[in-house]
Image (spheres, grey):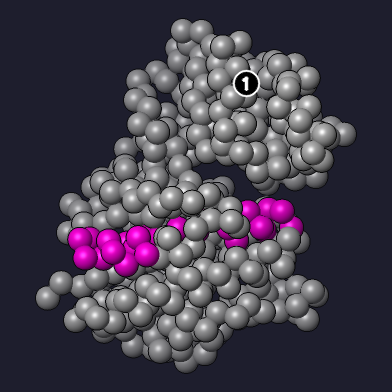
Amino acid sequence: MTTKYAIIIPDGAADYPLDLFDGKTILQAAEIPNTDKISINGKQGIVQTIPPDMPPGSDVAQMSLLGYDPLQYYSGRAPIEAAAQDIKLAPNDWVFRCNLVTIADGKMADHSAGHISTDEAAKLIYELENALADEHLHFYAGVSYRHLCLISGEKFDVQTQPPHDIIGRKVSKNLPRGKNADRLNDIMARSQHLFADHDINRVRRDLGENPVSSVWLWGEGQKARLESFRKRFGLKGAAITAVDLVRGLAKLIGFDVIDVPGATGFFDTNYVGKADAAIEALENYDLLFVHVEAPDEAGHSGNAELKKRAVEKIDKHIVGPIYDALQKYESWRILVMPDHPTPIEIRAHTDEAVPFAMDGTGINGILHKPFCEENAYQSGFRVENGFEMMEYFLKA
């Protein structure tokens, strides 16, 4: 008997209690009847997706969720995104995530330059390539503010900071440090001169939008390698996402990536389209991994209302339809969980354990209460190593 599996990731949805919602978290305040149904009918608990002493990034967390121990497999965020773009890395290549950011008054004001459009961003990255590239340095355009910088023939041992984790902090105290960090800081400084009076920035300022002050280099690493998911778990999988990080992980483990028109990686993403694509794909795949970035972006923006609405849209337009569609199969399971918290008050990722809810064939409940952080902790069920969650979901 073939079992169908669906995993839905509302990125960064876990949070802390907020005065705005009378001491409730986003998950408690939001209207999420479908996720609540999964939690009440099935099983909820908490899972530690970030191993000790590792950065609480989506790269580490998503790798854990897919069943791979980051302590064994992690080689940096940028190499994963390079895989998404089919960029072939040589053994002596280093690749860095290259954000387009807004710096104001010496502080990181916006990690996304106002969620700049992909078209505007591509033009800036193209000009950066023309101005700075040589046989050892190249830039690759991605989606919106997310791009890549490849440096070959040099060695790096640096500490870099994700720009979304230093919102409101002084840039000078968070620049790359370590062996060959000067190379990275020089590239960033040269980009500032190139962008300062650029036509795109003039228009953005006139429209009251955040300009692109600089590129920001971080998430460094060398070529990534992961074992085949099908070889490890015996299942054919596919991913639906709008961000290169998840695309890259999917490609590295042998998942197909299903593109959805209108999927943006932000609040305005095509929620309905993602669900429709997943439901259709269930006919041909054993496991669907559906990722939605919107709650995380709202968390980084410090916008609690937007984050709440994003979680509600995911529940209504993605969780509900997929949950209903699974019922027609003789054997099925569904898992809903954030990858990490992105608390509104911090506007950055944290490494606390996150709640999960699962339901389906063979799943027996523990605590029949709605889905939220508090109830998940009360269940007493904890998966200490995040990479073991996949094995449990598939076989428990």
**Is residue 118 shown left or right of residue 172?**
left
Residue 338 picture location, percent across and down? 51, 64
- Residue 275, percent from left and from top: 40, 65
Q: Is residue 293 a member of the stretch shown in magenta?
A: yes
Q: Residue at x 61, y 39 (%)?
A: 117
Residue 100 higher or lower than 228, as above or below: above
Residue 376 magenta-highlighted: no
Q: Is residue 171 left or right of residue 387?
A: right
Name which residue lies at 60% across and 31% down: 121
Residue under label 1:
184
The residue located at (40%, 89%) in the rendering is 41
Q: Secondary structure at mark 1?
A: helix
* Residue under the point 36% across and 24% down: 89
User: The residue under label 1 is which amino acid type?
Assistant: Leu
**In the picture shown, does residue 178 fall above or below 211?**
above
In the picture, residue 366 is in which quadrant? bottom left
Q: Residues within 10 Å of mark 1 (few under 14, many from 20)?
A: many
Front residue of this view, candidates 257 and 82? 257
Extreme left residue here?
A: 1
Query: In the rendered image of this protein, does residue 176 appear above or below residue 144?
Result: above
Residue nearer the viewer, 180 or 66: 66
